[in-house]
Amino acid sequence: MLKLGVLGSTGRMGVHVMSLATGQYADRVSVTAKVTRGGSIDTLLGCDVVIDFSSPEAISAAVDAALEAGKKSPAWVVGSTGLGDGQRERLTRLAKATPVLV
């Protein structure tokens, strides 16, 4: 079973991802981390895959945590919009260690 983390789990797209993961794909996916504004990002690091529909600020903090953790990071699917050069640079660094799709 795939361990899934959702960053931005209470936003419009995060709710849709959660609905699919706990409904149609519940036999293949286990949501092991749901992070909302102000939540602990560290819980995402134990997942196989993180799907992000948060904000540029939240993805920056999450990627920084993954880079600093010093262990294998989950794969990342980033659907947040409005990413700036700083966020893209962080994601490029993370992509050297784990799969990243933006």
Image: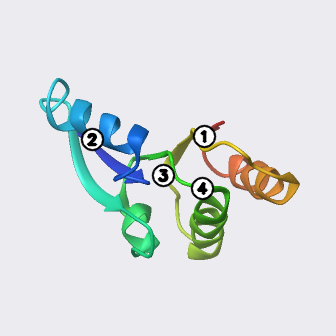
Q: Residues within 10 Å of mark 1 (few under 14, many from 20)?
A: some
Give the Cα separation between the discs numbered 4 and 3: 19 Å
Residue on which disc 2 sits: 18
Q: Is residue 55 above or below residue 1?
A: below
Closer to the chain start, of discs 2 and 4, is 2
Residue 13 falls left or right of residue 57 = left
The residue at 44%/64% (across/down) is 45
Q: Nearer the viewer, mark 4 or mark 3?
A: 4
Q: Is residue 37 above or below residue 86?
A: below
Give the Cα separation between the discs numbered 4 and 1: 20 Å
Closer to the chain start, of discs 1 and 2, is 2
In the foreground, 64 or 35: 35
Q: Are marks 4 and 1 in contact (CB under 8 Å)?
A: no
The kind of residue tagged 2 is: Met
Closer to the chain start, of discs 4 and 3, is 4
The kind of residue tagged 1 is: Pro
Q: Nearer the viewer, mark 2 or mark 3?
A: 2
Residue on which disc 1 sits: 99
Residue 74: give its label.
Answer: 3
Give the Cα separation between the discs numbered 1 and 3: 8 Å
